Image: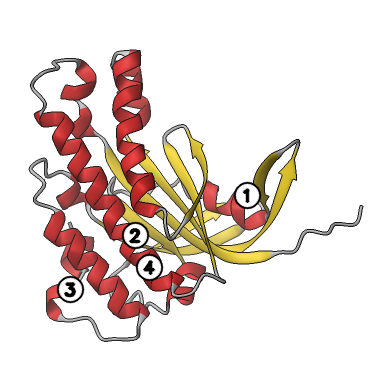
Amino acid sequence: MPSTDRPESGFLVLADISGFTAFVTATELEHGAEVTGVLLAGVMEALSPPLEIQELEGDAVFALGPDDAEGADRRLLEAFGRAFAAFGERRREISLDTSCACRACRGVLGLSLKLIVHHGSFLRQVVRGRSRVAGPDIILAHRFLKNDVEPTTYVLFTGAAVERFGIDPVAAGMARYTGTYAHFGEVDCYVVSLDRFGRLGDGGNGEVLLGLRSLLSDLALGADPGPQDDLRPVVAA
């Protein structure tokens, strides 16, 4: 069957709440859904723009960053920092709200955020009036949600993503992770762990996340990271 759809390329980003299943099964239905909705709404607002939100997939947000968007790479890295900051701030606000003593509000600090960042090709399609994107890289990006990376708060960049950003993962102190996925084989990824900051409940991770954003932005522009931006202590957390 001939197709008039043209392939595009860009960043494929998934923002996923870690601890979601344990949280929703141990909390009140209406309160648990409301809490996760507030957290995901903050992440979506932080990511778009520059990203295009494609789907809200239960405990995850799937978004695209097409390559044809001017200055997209740098703005995308800045959006990652905003997403972590928004998630942390909304989580802190909920935990400090003494007007509600439900299990959901009291257990919100057990939730954390992870970002999966891939770069690849995709097709835009309209199926029965609903727009969607498809392609092997879309499947692969979602496969990365299931991994045995030890941190719970982190950014996982695929090799294709760091190459597109122009980031040197060794210089940045990123931990290498190789995942094996059916039909795709072994795929190299690079992880920035933020666990030590994700556990903070007082909003004190803001400066660290700003430092992460600054470092990644500098690396994307080809600048040498300064000692204040070294991620090696973070990866070792």
Above-or-below relation of 16 to 118: above
Residue 48: mark in rendering: none
Q: Earlier in the sequence, mark 2 or mark 3?
A: 2
Q: Earlier in the sequence, mark 3 or mark 4?
A: 4
In the picture, measured across the screen, residue 197 lies left or right of residue 167, that is left
- Mark 4, residue position: 75
- Residue 164: image location, x then y, percent: 48, 75
Q: Residues within 10 Å of mark 1 (few under 14, many from 20)?
A: few
What amino acid is labelled 2 in the image?
Answer: Ala
Look at the image and tell me in which quarter the C terminus lies.
bottom left
Q: Residues within 10 Å of mark 3 (few under 14, many from 20)?
A: many
- Mark 3, residue position: 229
Mark 1 touches mark 4? (CB < 8 Å): no
What amino acid is labelled 1 in the image?
Answer: Ala
Give SS at disc 3.
Answer: helix
Give SS at disc 1.
Answer: loop
Q: Is residue 87 visible?
A: yes
Q: Residues within 10 Å of mark 2 (few under 14, many from 20)?
A: many
Q: Earlier in the sequence, mark 3 or mark 1?
A: 1
The answer for how far apart the CA atoms under marks 2 and 3 are is 18 Å
Residue, far bottom: 223
- Which quadrant holds residue 157? bottom left
Q: Residue at x 43, y 60 (%)?
A: 50
